[in-house]
Amino acid sequence: MTARYRPRTRDELDPAQRMLHDRIVDGPRRAEASVVPITDADGRLLGPFGPMTIAPVVGDAVQGVGAALRFASTMDARTKEASILLVAARRRCVYEWVLHHDAARAAGVPADAVALLRAGTVPTGIDAETDAALVVVDRLLAASALADEEYTSALAALGEVVLAELVWLVGYYSMLALALAVFDPPLGEGVADPWTGGG
């Protein structure tokens, strides 16, 4: 099956879409573009970023949330990347998994923990914050809420700011997984499904 969304070159976009394209390409993600490509060789946005240009006003707000989570969050990088992997695994989002796998390893998520995350299982023994965060992510993905005792425990372990960032992270990466499943854009060269033996 061919992709539902056909990525467009910058010249094919209308002025509002071009502004969003440029904001994504020239924003904070640019520093990681050699590791996490956001465009193909012709400048077409990859992954969820192309579909964000369909409705550019909303797409701009969405990409802004992602940039804040990635580049301005107070959350420890290991906690953040392990949490993203758990969302990706539970949502079976190939793009998120592939793009964040190496970042998680670089942030210190052990290989055995990554293997458990890939299976959708919550590992333990990474570090106190990451372990507590993954319990929260697990509950949010399973129940879309925290019971009172879970909230109290999460607040004590993570603090209010990190807990809030974690809630937004789960929502944001779940939203990206949904958009990728609906629009099915091409994911770029070398992106293989980690759940079918391809990556």
Image (spheres, rainbow, N blue to C red):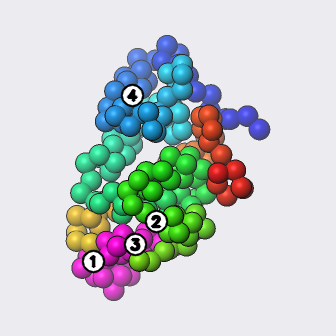
Q: Callout 3, which amino acid? A: Ile
Mark 1 lies on residue: 157
Q: Earlier in the sequence, mark 1 or mark 3?
A: 3
SS at badge 2: loop
User: Percent x, y for residue 71?
Assistant: 29, 46
Residue 22, above or below 51: above
User: Percent x, y for residue 105?
Assistant: 45, 56
The residue segment tinted magenta is 127-156
Q: Earlier in the sequence, mark 2 or mark 3?
A: 2
User: Percent x, y for residue 30?
Assistant: 36, 32
Q: Earlier in the sequence, mark 4 or mark 2?
A: 4
How far apart marks 1 and 2 lie (CA) works out to: 21 Å
In this orientation, which residue lies closer to the viewer: 23 or 183? 23
Q: Earlier in the sequence, mark 1 or mark 4?
A: 4
How far apart marks 2 and 3 lie (CA) works out to: 7 Å
The residue depicted at 29 percent of the width and 67 percent of the height is 163
Q: Mark 3 and mark 4 in contact (Cβ < 8 Å)? A: no
